Image (spheres, rainbow, N blue to C red):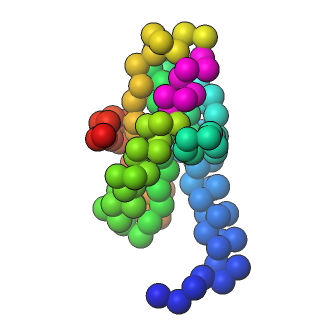
Amino acid sequence: MKPRSRQDRQQARRRGIAAETLCLWLLRLKGYRILARDLRTPVGEIDIVARRGNTLVAVEVKRRGTLEDAADAIGRDQRRRILRALGWFAQRQADGERLALRFDAMLLDGGLLPRHISDAWRDDG
């Protein structure tokens, strides 16, 4: 695999931002309140942090050629980092100890709308 050019990386980043923006709006339409985007913590990163009721949700957005490839791109180590980052974020909420934590994925394959997988994975160590 040849290294990606600066232009290719910039284009991929623009596509990623567009995918996250679309996912943000869809989550809002579903009744979620967006608390953070591109959250970077000392223990990990989360694409979108949203809340609906007493549920705090980390949403990982992946865009690939197929939905299967997008799902496969969320590896075990990445899930662990997201888990740690959501815990870190929850601890800083006034009612953090009462919140249920959930991990969702929003997958895009070039179609019109992303596929929202609620509770996409559980804590796997």
Can residue 32 be seen at all in this image of the molecule? no
Can residue 42 be seen at all in this image of the molecule? yes
Residue at 55 percent of width and 10 percent of height: 95
Answer with the quarter of the image where residue 4 lies. bottom right
Spot occupied by residue 21 in the image (x, y as percentages of width and height): 62, 47
Residue at 56 percent of width and 33 percent of height: 49
Please determine whether, in this image, residue 37 is positioned above or below residue 19.
Answer: above
Q: Nearer the viewer, residue 49 or 68?
A: 49
Please determine whether, in this image, residue 106 is positioned above or below residue 63.
Answer: above
Q: Is residue 105 magenta?
A: no
Spot occupied by residue 56 in the image (x, y as percentages of width and height): 48, 24
Q: Nearer the viewer, residue 4 or 29?
A: 4
Q: Nearer the viewer, residue 42 or 64?
A: 42
User: Which residue is most to the bottom?
Assistant: 2
Magenta stretch secondary structure, dominant? helix
Q: Relative to residue 30, is residue 34 drawn left or right? A: right
Give the magenta part as a residue range: 86-93
Q: How many marks?
A: 0
Which quadrant, please, contains the C terminus? top left
Q: Nearer the viewer, residue 64 or 28?
A: 64
Residue at 55 percent of width and 29 percent of height: 88
